[in-house]
Amino acid sequence: KHALVDRPLPSHLLGHAGTAVRHLPDLLRVVRRQLAHRRGRAGSFPDTMIQLRAMSEQAPNPLSRVTLDSKRDTHGVPLARLDWRLTELDRRSVRQAQDLIDTALRRAGLGRLENCLGDEWPPAEQRGQWHHMGTTRMHADPRQGVVDPQGRVHGKRNLYVAGSSVFPTSGYANPTLTVVALALRLADELRTARW
């Protein structure tokens, strides 16, 4: 009923080292097409490089925080300060995804994947977008979350949160549709509530 709301992190998380693994056939088709395009025809390929980018999910980490900074905006409101920490599990997940992609490329005779991580963790250069989630985590137990499965702040009769901050875990992709669904569900509940 409530997916990951009141469950621990799945034990098989490391086994799902990214959606690229599920879509390896698609990835191989793209690589073949790019190599053929660069060569002008299919067949043996010259030495060439294709850069792959990946998006990955980070495991929930209680050491990551959003706090208020001493700096203030033009209206005098404290700025948010993000202390985002990647873990060893995150590194192993990315490394395993790279290993799986490398194996698939080699088996298909399309080349190899060079390790883009190196030994540095977390990587100095990270590109892309981040969806900050989990700051008002949803959980049925008030000791483990800020809001209940309906989005009501524990211990408050008339205070609700509907947004990605209630997600117990994040995904690799944009959270917008899920945020909208939560907001619509909450709006329906509030509209029919007996106060």
Image (cartoon, rainbow, N blue to C red):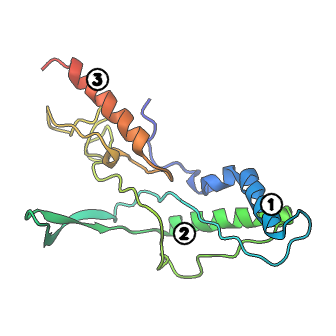
Residue 32 is tagged as: 1
Eye-nearest disc, 3 or 2: 3
Marks 1 and 3, how far apart at CA: 49 Å
Mark nearer the N terminus (3 vs 2): 2
Q: Amino acid at mark 1?
A: Arg
Eye-nearest disc, 1 or 3: 1
Q: Categorize mark 2 by other alpha carbons within 10 Å: few (<14), some (14-19), many (20+).
A: some
Q: Quadrant of the C terminus?
A: top left
Q: Categorize mark 1 by other alpha carbons within 10 Å: few (<14), some (14-19), many (20+).
A: some
Eye-nearest disc, 2 or 1: 1
Q: What is the x, y in percent for residue 191? A: 22, 21
Do we see residue 6 in this rendering?
no
Comparing 53 with 160, the one in front is 53
Provide the secondary structure element on which disc 3 rests: helix
Q: Quadrant of residue 5?
A: top left
Q: What is the x, y in percent for residue 75? A: 8, 62
Q: Amino acid at mark 2?
A: Arg
Q: What is the x, y in percent for residue 10? A: 52, 48
Q: Quadrant of the N terminus?
A: top left
